[in-house]
Amino acid sequence: MSTPRIATSFLLRGSRSSIARAPRQFRAFPVPTSRVTPLAIRSQFRPYSQDSPPLSKIYAFEDVQKLSTNPSPSRILIDTREPGELQSSGTIPGALNIPVVSQADSWFITPDEFEDRYGFERPGKDVEIVFFCKAGVRSKAAAELARQAGWANIGEYKG
């Protein structure tokens, strides 16, 4: 009778041990082996900062309309579009044409070369120059080139 008891107790122990043990579970995230402490990250972004003011005076349509009807020797309108565009769409009356794309060096050449190339005297550095084009991209580029060449009194009309 001892043999069946031994077999029964052996089977019960084996079944108990498997029931008592929880099955292994897989985790989606690894368990950290050391404690990680978050660092405080300092941001360089300041939400209250403001953009710097534009370097050029920005003109509205009404301002340019007044300039074209009442021209002044102290202020010059310059169209920065290419000559082909002027023929197809026209220009503001009284404006001079200095194309910025094909003639990017126009503000860096000598006054004699400037007059030979464009047929009029280069504006003095004391004169306000107002650049314009169709959408404002070329006028902004021309204003920056003129600023680099030493002109400070610059305006832009964004077309």
Image (cartoon, helix red, strand yellow):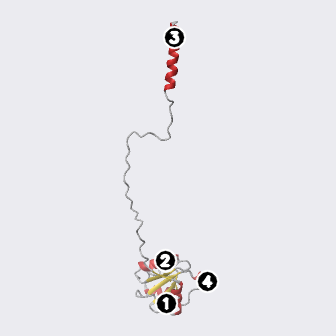
Tag 4 or tag 2, which sits nearer the N-term? 4
Q: Decide which of tag 1 and tag 2 comes sooner along the chain.
A: 1
Contact (Cβ within 8 Å) of mark 1 with mark 2: no
Instruction: Indicate which label's residue lies in the foreground, 1 or 2.
Output: 2
Which residue is nearer to you in this view: 98 or 10?
10
**Sequence-wise, which precedes: disc 4 or disc 1?**
4
CA gap between label 1 and label 3 equals: 121 Å
Q: Residues within 10 Å of mark 3 (few under 14, many from 20)?
A: few
- The residue at which mark 2 appears reads as 140
Distance, label 2 to label 4, CA atoms, is: 20 Å
Foreground: disc 4 or disc 3 = 3
* Residue sitting nearer the eye, 73 or 64: 64
Residue 120's disc is: 1
Tell me the SS state at disc 4.
helix
Q: Residue at x 52, y 21 (%)?
A: 15
- Counting from the top left corner in percent of width and height, residue 55 is at 42, 78
Indicate which disc, 2 or 3, sits on the residue closer to the N terminus. 3
Marks 2 and 3 close (CB-CB < 8 Å): no
* Residue underneath mark 4: 89
Q: CA gap, disc 1 to disc 2?
A: 22 Å
Disc 2 to disc 3, C-alpha distance: 100 Å
Q: Residue at x 45, y 77 (%)?
A: 144
Q: In the rendered image, which residue does mark 3 sit on?
A: 5
Residue drawn 52% across the image and 77% down it: 138
Marks 4 and 1, Cα distance to the nearest angstrom?
23 Å
